[in-house]
Image (tube, helix red, strand yellow):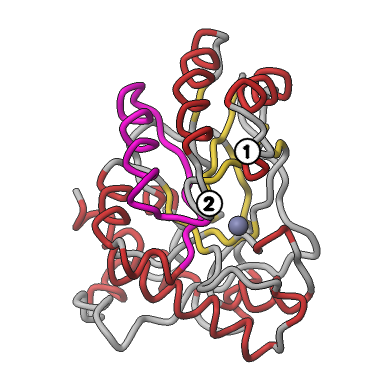
Amino acid sequence: MKKDQLLTRRAALLAGGVGAAATAGVLTAVTGDVPAGSGPAAGAQARSPRSASAYRLQPLTGYGPPHAAPRRTLVRREPLLRVSGRGRTIVLTFDDGPDPRYTPDVLDTLAEYDVRAMFFVCGEMAADSRGLLSRMTDEGHVVGNHTWSHPLLTRLTRRQIRREMERTSEVIEETCGERPEWFRAPYGAWNRATFQIGAELGMEPLAWTLDTLDWTTPGTRSIVRRVENGAAPGVVVLSHDAGGDRSQSVRALRRYLPGLLDSGYRVTVPRRHYA
Ligand SMILES: [Zn+2]
């Protein structure tokens, strides 16, 4: 299964070509339509303009260093704020981790209800908790890039921004076996450079629709109420599993997740399409 996904992924990479040509034929859309348990690589089913034999001639042992070139994406002018999809689809995202004090609890709750979420991890946290990163991947969650040290990117040089993103993507690739396909700027502070560099590294920028404000530790009930009141089809929910005392975020998830499912929401992860 894993091998098939890698092959499919590789075919898609080759179909994309390199450099500017790669962006021309790629239409990236976001949808909540993803079957539970399917990895992000499953979305990479490009209609290959090459014959199958063309990529079979390529060595299939990539993914160790030196890294394969990332598949560039279109450069956006603003981040995606929500997902499209049929029905009552909602996406849960957890930022700034992983943190061994809180992330395992979040993962346990998600596993209990058999739903997938997104984790926008910081490289310096991830490097210390690779086991948690592996667990995220193994359990079908999507690991995104949230920079190395969580700086305000708009105050950094292009070179510094690239370094923040690149190092983090490397840790994710080394640990999860795949480059991240999603990127989120700390504090939601985006600029042209972040979109351009993110695209060069093959990532789509995803912001959020609903901030639970859990980082202000407003109390578990307040976090739950925000999610319940803000839930709507296509909404992307922002929470945190690190960066401070996140016990309220952990407890809130246990309360609002079954509530969302009872209300008919499909909690899922977005998937990128390559047309
Ligand atoms: Zn953050």
Q: Earlier in the sequence, mark 1 or mark 2?
A: 1
**Regarding mark 2 in the picture, which secondary structure is present there?**
loop
Provide residue 168's location: percent of width, then percent of height: 45, 73
Identity of the residue drawn at 54% across and 58% down: 182
Q: Is residue 19 left or right of residue 128?
A: right
The part of the image, by quadrant, that contains residue 204 is: bottom right
Left or right? Give the position of 111 relative to 29: left
Residue at the spot of label 2? 244
Identify which residue is drawn at 63% across, 38% down: 217
To which residue does mark 1 refer? 217
**Rounded to the nearest whole Å, what is the CA distance between mark 1 and mark 2?**
9 Å
Rendered residue at 36%/81% (across/down): 68
238 over 250 or under it: above or below: below
Q: Which residues are magenta?
A: 95-122
Q: How many numbered discs sit on the rendered protein?
A: 2
* Outermost top residue: 262
